[in-house]
Amino acid sequence: MAIEGLSINLATVRKQYDMKQAVDACLKQGITAIAPWRDQVHAIGLSEAARVVADNGLRVTGLCRGGMFPAADAEGRRAAIDDNKRAIDEAAALNADCLVLVVGGLPEGSKDIVHAREMVSDGIAAILPHARASGVPIAIEPLHPMYAADRACVNTMEQALDICDLLGEGIGVAVDVYHVWWDPKLDQQIARAGAGGRILAHHICDWLVPTTDLLLDRGMMGDGVIDLKRIRRTIEAAGFHGPQEVEIFSAENWWKRPGEEVISTCAERFLTVC
Amino acid sequence: MAIEGLSINLATVRKQYDMKQAVDACLKQGITAIAPWRDQVHAIGLSEAARVVADNGLRVTGLCRGGMFPAADAEGRRAAIDDNKRAIDEAAALNADCLVLVVGGLPEGSKDIVHAREMVSDGIAAILPHARASGVPIAIEPLHPMYAADRACVNTMEQALDICDLLGEGIGVAVDVYHVWWDPKLDQQIARAGAGGRILAHHICDWLVPTTDLLLDRGMMGDGVIDLKRIRRTIEAAGFHGPQEVEIFSAENWWKRPGEEVISTCAERFLTVC
């Protein structure tokens, strides 16, 4: 039995499976959409990864991840741009819906978040022509403000969409409920993103209370406080009807369980609480 | 030697000192502004606390804290309003610059943050007449979005100022750099707050990288990534020239050091990096 509308971000089972094993486990449970990370693709090789995708008729809801643009010197910024261009090529080879960007935070030793944000806009501008030529939409993922220093200095939908409006075609946002559920302007900005055709991905998991680790304590859908159904309705009302992609980093819980159980739980929760 | 413009929020030394001991330790180092928490006031009694403040000519930059308005039922919401009115009376007795509100998060079992926010606005509206009559300004403290579920569902300056504009006179914001440093609209909203005469307090500490605990791992000024001087200039340009109030919750570091060392470090950093 196929489960329509559900994608598994393979970070969710990265401790249990390599990419091929994860795909097999998804297919066994009727799930035909995935989102791999680049290290998972590299581990089996890009051509093999592309073959796995094509042979199984998989939808790739995103390739994770490009970004990480800010750097302390020009050489570092150039290296980031080159690496992002390679990521675009990989996304094209996998026929991914988008390349997801985690844009990067403050360079080592810097306290200048305004400058970091300029480096992000400049970096995206530099890769966008290659993305357009490759037919790969670029998805900025606004990350929760608790990651502003060390992972991503784009922290709200509004800020991400301002960058999109500045840069034009071929770019949008990945809406991850974990990062944006708290935002008082969420509904307004989802509507704005939808009107501009800029919603490229919809990631789900849950916010646990308490949260014991800033990075690796994401919850399974239904175990936390995010009103997933409400946000889904808002995103669908804005015109996005792509798969919901489960992305859970959970060092002490889900990464320690059998992969099969994790994926079946994702499927069961997707069908009941999302 | 007096240190002008520095206030110590007494939570910073709550494990080392009671309120009287903390005041003595501050005075010894030339610091004449403090911000106590209600439990610290209650521990020595309100009249004794007021006497300590008056006899020593202390400036009380804020009383922490009122708020916590959302509740699962009407009785809980009424109890919160009653408690906030008592907090207003205590702030008046201490001649505090403001009563700081940590507004509260989701009631137990709720995922409805929109409703929680309505309960916050309604609760503040209910206490505001008493605050105005008592001459106690109410300071909404927008808390970092990582506290949206369990501490405060007001998470940006913009959101707090929208509530202020809705409710009128006698209310403003406490700008705590820890909660707002990441906000792409920070400068804009500080200017807005200043223009409306709504900046009531300026709290400082630092954001550590990495941060190992969501609540109790705040850094000493200078040890993290917040550009304190820049934010101070922005706040002063907006017309607020009150003391900077150091508020550090640090279970594994500053709460374990001698109180005298903590306060002298606050003073030294205030004079060098703030």
Image (cartoon, coloured by chain):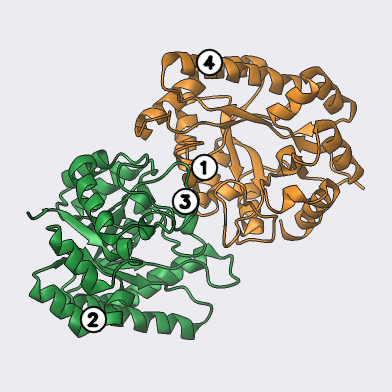
Chain colours: A orange, B green
> Of B120 and B89, which appears nearest the observer?
B89
* Residue placed under numbered mark 2 in the picture: B89
Q: Position of residue A219 (x, y in %)?
A: 66, 55
Q: Which residue is mark 4?
A: A79
Measure the C-alpha gap from mark 2 to mark 1.
Answer: 45 Å
Local packing at callout 4 (Cα closer than 10 Å; few below 14, some 14-19, many 20+) is few
| Picture quarter with the C terminus of chain A | bottom right
Q: CA distance from mark 3 to mark 4?
A: 35 Å
Provide the chain ID for the residue under circle 3. Answer: A
Mark 4 or mark 1: whose residue is earlier in sequence: 4
Check disc 1 and report its element: helix, strand or loop: helix
According to the picture, the residue beneath numbered tag 1 turns out to be A192
Identify residue for label 3: A185
Give coordinates of residue B105: x percent, y percent: 48, 66
- Whether residues under marks 4 and 1 lie with C-beta atoms below 8 angstroms apart, the answer is no
Query: In whole angstroms, how far apart are the C-alphas of marks 4 and 1?
Result: 33 Å
Nearer to me, A219 or B196 = A219
* Residue B267 badge: none
